[in-house]
């Protein structure tokens, strides 16, 4: 009898959609963190295990899916066309994001009336020159890049290897089949890791919720509210608008199919770490081909940081308002340009946006020690901006897939819900 009850419970658990399990873990984590306070950190190892498992997937998944994505195209002209479309859409949406952040921050003025002392100082990183960025893209030792998880260098090497395998024709077929099998194994391992996601999300959120109390958050609540509002506007208006107007697709299906990845991004605050889930959502929920998703998503996880750009726009104006610094149209234009470029160079890991913020602030002459004001709540802001980054990656992948005829609209429009329910 007990065995039947157990089997029935397991069957019921499997029937629940993954995104519902993850959202349940998120809600339960918030509740437990609020009740237990800092004691809730005892659940953090669950989150750490989940994050470690996700990070374990990144390098082999990016490497294999990029090679499979490139070799599956077989057409160098198609690769170039997709590359141009991808980068154009990413840059365009990033400029939109930082403009929305500036507009809402100007309208709602989160920094007006806030009086906080600067007890600490965050030392800014020097902005790398364009020449050094270009030079560092090419790995001296690809094995070293793989071992150290240097995603940009891995992408360059994978693209070069994929193009070379395509150009040598039949001689490259055996290697292509190896990478194709390896990529399939990585997809399956991703599904196994994702089965643990509800528990990992619970552990992460319980720790975050327990660590930050209302007494810490209230003075900066308006800043948090503006960032979250700007993120919602960008996803619901800009991304959904692009999907509807450019892709002629139902934006609700895009949002529904992206939900798993958005929730994981919110809890982990890592767009690179969410990449395995994004690839799974693109292929299984949105009906995008392996070729397009395997190429566009890894590139997006590296260069598309709409949420980070949006965050920089809001926070820079918050600090300017708080310190009484008047900004003109020249400074606004500089924030948009610098924020867009800085966001491209931001690593897709938790907290990287805070470092890149110093570059934007230095360009318009704001006191760099003021970064310490937002450092205490950066994790909460990081969770929101990472969700936007990941949603943007999937939006661009959907549009590119549709434009190339590599989006299965049967899955996107009809089988989407069934796919999610079985996930």
Image (spheres, rainbow, N blue to C red):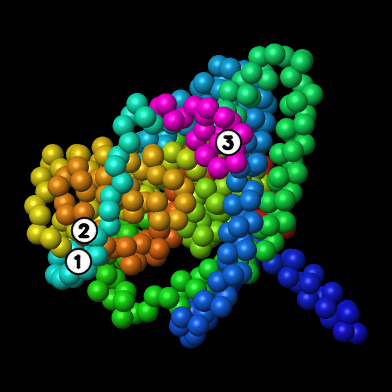
Q: Image check: 301 left or right of 324?
A: right
SS under mark 1: loop
For the point 52% across and 33% down, which residue is it?
153
Relative placement, left or right, of 311 versus 423 is left
Q: How crowded is mark 1: few (under 14 residues within 10 Å), some or many (20 or more)?
A: few
Q: Residues within 10 Å of mark 2 (few under 14, many from 20)?
A: some
Q: Name the residue under label 2.
A: 369
User: Is 173 drawn above or below residue 105 in the view shown?
Assistant: above
The quadrant holding residue 376 is: bottom left
Q: Position of residue 282 (x, y in %)?
A: 60, 44
In the image, the segment drawn in magenta is 134-154
Q: Is residue 144 magenta?
A: yes
**Of marks 3 and 2, which one's residue comes earlier in the chain?**
3
Residue 56 sits above or below residue 117 on the image: above
Residue 370 visible (yes or no): yes
Percent across and percent down for residue 304 are 43, 41
Residue 144: assigned label: 3
Asked if the residues shown at circle 1 and circle 2 are in contact, with their CB atoms under 8 angstroms apart, the answer is yes
Q: How far apart are marks 1 and 2 (CA)?
A: 7 Å
Residue 327: horizontal and vertical position, in percent? 11, 48
Q: Position of residue 6 (x, y in %)?
A: 83, 78
Q: Earlier in the sequence, mark 1 or mark 2?
A: 1
- For the C terminus, the image quarter is bottom right
- Looking at the rendered structure, the secondary structure element under dot 3 is helix
Dot label at residue 118: 1
Quadrant for the N terminus, please. Answer: bottom right
Depth check: 323 or 242 in front? Answer: 323
Say how many tags the image has.
3
Q: Main secondary structure of the magenta part?
A: helix
Foreground label between 3 and 1: 3
Q: Residue at x 49, y 27 (%)?
A: 138
């Amino acid at each position: 009898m007990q065995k039947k009850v157990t089997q029935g419970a397991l069957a019921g658990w499997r029937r629940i959609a993954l995104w519902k399990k993850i959202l349940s873990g998120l809600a339960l984590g918030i509740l437990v963190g609020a009740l237990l306070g800092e004691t809730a950190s005892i659940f953090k190892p669950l989150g750490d295990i989940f994050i470690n498992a996700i990070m374990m997937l990144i390098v082999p998944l990016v490497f294999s899916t990029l090679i499979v994505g490139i070799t599956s195209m077989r057409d160098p002209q198609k690769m170039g066309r997709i590359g141009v479309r991808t980068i154009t859409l990413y840059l365009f949406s990033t400029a939109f994001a930082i403009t929305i952040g500036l507009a809402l921050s100007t309208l709602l003025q989160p920094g007006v009336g806030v009086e906080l002392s600067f007890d600490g100082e965050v030392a800014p990183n020097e902005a790398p020159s364009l020449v050094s960025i270009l030079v560092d893209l090419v790995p001296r030792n690809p094995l070293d890049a793989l071992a150290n998880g240097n995603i940009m260098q891995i992408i360059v090497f994978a693209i070069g290897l994929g193009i070379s395998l395509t150009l040598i024709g039949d001689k490259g077929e055996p290697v292509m089949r190896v990478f194709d099998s390896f990529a399939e194994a990585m997809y399956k391992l991703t599904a196994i890791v994702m089965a643990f996601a509800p528990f990992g999300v619970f552990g992460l959120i319980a720790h975050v919720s327990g660590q930050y109390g209302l007494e810490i958050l209230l003075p900066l609540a308006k800043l948090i509210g503006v960032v979250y509002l700007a993120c919602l506007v960008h996803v619901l208006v800009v991304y959904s608008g692009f999907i509807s107007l450019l892709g002629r697709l139902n934006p609700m299906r895009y949002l529904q199919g992206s939900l798993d990845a958005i929730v994981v991004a919110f809890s982990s605050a890592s767009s690179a770490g969410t990449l395995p889930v994004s690839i799974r959502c693109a292929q299984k929920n949105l009906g995008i081909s392996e070729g397009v998703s395997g190429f566009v998503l890894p590139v997006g996880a590296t260069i598309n940081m709409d949420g980070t750009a949006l965050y920089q726009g809001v926070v820079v104006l918050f600090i300017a308002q708080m310190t009484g610094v008047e900004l003109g149209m020249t400074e606004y234009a500089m924030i948009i340009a610098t924020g867009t470029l800085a966001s491209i160079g931001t690593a897709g890991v938790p907290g990287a946006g805070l470092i890149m913020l110093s570059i934007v602030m230095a360009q318009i002459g704001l006191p760099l020690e003021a970064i310490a004001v937002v450092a205490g709540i950066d994790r909460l802001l990081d969770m929101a901006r990472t969700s936007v980054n990941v949603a943007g990656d999937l939006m661009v992948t959907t549009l590119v897939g549709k434009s190339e005829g590599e989006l299965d609209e049967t899955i996107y429009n009809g089988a989407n819900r069934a796919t999610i329910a079985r996930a």
